[in-house]
Image: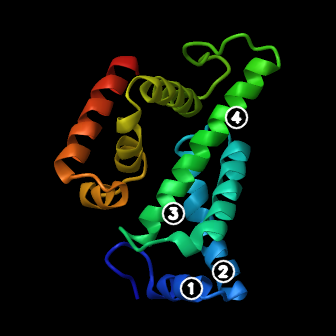
């Protein structure tokens, strides 16, 4: 049976059992979450291998931090935050490695002759998010959770501990900033 946030009562039960220390429940929960987490990471990273690597890091973080899940917002919302952060950290690490290995600077846009439209769009988005984070760091998380994580405004307000009006304003500022760069 499904709950309002798209999770199942089975998932809710697995979360409760895993939080209580049931290792088999944790393993089953992570197995159930894996496709969702990979899809979330794929929204950021153009290459399947990179998205899977970020998803694996996210699943490790979920397992390690499950006890800190406070029940603020939905469980899937909490997972979305972790997956989004993991994908962004993976992108930053890959970018840093590329620069250290001789790529003096990444191109402003992807080369359409060698990059798919989807991959190029994701690279452009990640670069624009990096610029946004430098200029207006407080607007990045609400934007990512809303426009890439598909979370409702109310849940983002709960997760970030920010008034709903502030969440809406930050998302608007982020969209305006990114629109100018994409």
Q: 108 above or below 143?
A: above
Q: CA–CA distance between discs 4 and 1?
A: 32 Å
> Mark 1 touching mark 2, by CB under 8 A?
yes
176 on left or right of 11: left
Disc 4 crowd rating (10 Å Cα; few below 14, some 14-19, many 20+) is few
Dot 1 or dot 2, earlier in sequence: 1
Residue at left 70%, top 52%?
52
Which is nearer the N-term, disc 3 or disc 1? 1
Tell me the distance, in whole angstroms, between the alpha carbons under discs 2 and 4.
28 Å
Using a 10 Å C-alpha cutoff, classify the residue at mark 1 as few (fewer than 14 neighbours), some (14 to 19) or many (20 or more): many
- The residue depicted at 39 percent of the width and 50 percent of the height is 145
Q: CA distance from mark 4 to mark 3?
A: 21 Å
In what quadrant of the picture does the N terminus appear? bottom left
**Rendering coords of residue 13 (x, y %):** 51, 89
Q: Is residue 137 left or right of residue 86?
A: left
Query: Which residue bears the numbered disc 1?
Result: 14
**Residue bearing the label numbered 2:** 26
The quarter of the displayed image where residue 14 is located: bottom right
- Residue to which mark 3 is pinned: 79
- The disc placed on residue 93 is 4
Please state, as top left, top right, bottom left or bottom right, where the C terminus lies in the image.
top left
Q: Residue at x 42, y 46 (%)?
A: 148
């Amino acid at each position: 049976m499904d709950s309002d946030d798209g999770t199942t009562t089975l998932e809710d039960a697995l979360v409760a059992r895993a939080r209580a220390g049931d290792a088999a429940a944790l393993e089953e929960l992570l197995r159930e979450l894996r496709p969702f987490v990979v899809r979330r990471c794929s929204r950021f990273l153009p290459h399947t291998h990179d998205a899977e690597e970020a998803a694996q890091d996210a699943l490790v973080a979920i397992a390690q931090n499950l006890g800190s899940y406070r029940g603020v917002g939905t469980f899937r919302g909490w997972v979305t935050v972790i997956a989004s952060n993991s994908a962004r950290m993976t992108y930053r690490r890959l970018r840093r490695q590329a620069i250290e290995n001789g790529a003096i600077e990444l191109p402003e846009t992807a080369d359409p002759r060698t990059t798919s439209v989807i991959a190029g769009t994701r690279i452009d988005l990640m670069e624009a998010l990096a610029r946004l984070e430098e200029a207006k760091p407080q607007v990045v998380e609400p934007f990512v959770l809303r426009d890439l994580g598909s979370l409702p405004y109310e849940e983002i307000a709960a997760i970030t501990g920010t008034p709903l009006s502030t969440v809406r304003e930050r998302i608007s500022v982020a969209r305006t900033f990114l629109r100018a760069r994409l």
